Structure formats: structure tokens, C-alpha cells
Image (tube, rainbow, N blue to C red):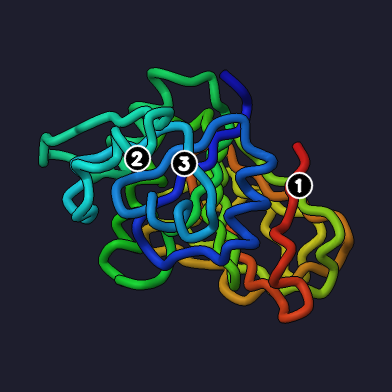
Amino acid sequence: MGEICLLVLAGKPPSAELITWRMEEADYSVAVDGGFLSFREAGLLPDVLIGDLDSLSDEGTFESEFPELEIVHLHEQDTTDFEKALAWISENTGSRRVNILGGLGKRTDHLITNLMIASVADKSLEITFDDDHEWIRRITPQCPLVLRGRKGADLSIIPLCQSTGVGTKGLQWELDCETIGGSRIVGQSNKCKADKVEIQCATGSFFVILEKNYSLQRESPQPSL
């Protein structure tokens, strides 16, 4: 059904400009519960709406107001709506890249939970969180990162679990087959010293975080593999 899926959660809403741009590049778009409101504010309609819809007071009007919208009701409470959505995407689309908006900010507990869920999701899935101020990409053995055109940008490497064989090229402070996570937490406030930065690992997963400079806030980093 397409390589790229846009997934919008009910966290801090993205700007209309960011969600419009991300939707233009996506092959498939999914709103998770209250994430539907971000689409509606931007005058957009996702392909599917997923969740228990507990944060949408006008749930009953969707089918008549948006007859072309596919609605997937998922009411079980053992997993979060984010987990439900990732599982649904894996089972129903061919997407290998998931760009997530509305997953950062607003509530710290939701942010941490979202990162924890992403850290253990299918390692072959390229997962990126994006908003108007920062960009976060998960790194796994199957999904290394190549960044271009970010010389001088601040970059942090944050592990939530142990990763081995972590290597970088193009950073001010390089990692060479390092083990990170657990008691070995490294990588905060590093810097891109080259126009091409490469980051990879042999096992585990971790996150690369880029804060968007004021002049670049409209432009999310575009990794190339």
C-alpha cells in the first residue's frame, strides 16, 4: 500500500504546514484518536481513523460527515492507541517508514511512553517522530541513519535500552563500536561536524535527536539510507 505512512497522535498538534507537507510525501495516512483533530484543523482527511475515539466527542457524526473515512474501532485497554496503530499498520499496509506527528510535547508521561513503545517496535520499521521544533529518529541494526546537509547542527544520541556496536561518522565526538544504554549513557549535545553524518548499531535501538534551528524549523531532516 506504499512505503511511507504518516501517523498522527493526539499529543502536541503539529502546524498545518508540517502536517500538510508530511501528508504530501506519505502513501498512507492514519489518525490515532484525537490526532484526527490535527488533520481537521489543516483541512485534511486521513485515510483511516484508529482507536477507542474517547477523546473525540463528536464520534457519532464521523460516518455521516466523512463517508470516505475508514474508521477502525479498537476498544481493548491492554495497549495504548499508539501500540494499536503500529500493529494495525504492520498488519494492513506495506509501509516500512512511519513518520509520527503529535508524539512529542504536551504530556511528559505520554512522550516517555511513546519513546518506550517505539524502542521495542519492529526493528525493520524506520520510525521518525517530528514536530515544529525537533526531530527524533530511531536507529536499529536494520535502520541505520545517513544525514546530509546538517553541518553545525546539535545532535544527541539517547538510548532507552542497551545497544552494542554503535558507530558514528561525521560527529564532533565519534563513537567506535561502543556499547550504550544501561549504565553507559553517552551522546548528549554532540555536533555534526560534516555535511554527511552516519550512525549505526549492531544490536538494540536508540534515538537520534536533532533540534531544528530557527531558520530550519520548517524543514525536517531528510535521512537517506
Q: Residue at x 69, y 59 (%)?
A: 220
Q: Amino acid at mark 2?
A: Glu
* Residue 164 shows up from this direction: no
Q: Amino acid at mark 3?
A: Gly
Which residue is tagged 3? 204
Q: Which of the 4 quarters of the picture holds residue 78?
A: top left
Q: Residue at x 37, y 58 (%)?
A: 182
Whether tag 3 and tag 2 are in contact, CB under 8 A, the answer is no
- Judged from the image, the secondary structure of the residue bearing numbered disc 3 is loop
On the image, the x and y values in percent for residue 197 come to 79, 55
Residue 146 numbered mark, or none: 1
Whether tag 1 and tag 2 are in contact, CB under 8 A, the answer is no
Q: Which of the 4 quarters of the picture holds residue 87?
A: top left
Judge whether 193 appears above or below 166 on screen.
below
Q: Residue at x 76, y 72 (%)?
A: 216
In this view, the mark in front (1 or 2): 2
Residue 193 numbered mark, or none: none
Residue 65 numbered mark, or none: 2
Label 1, label 2: how many angstroms apart (C-alpha)? 43 Å
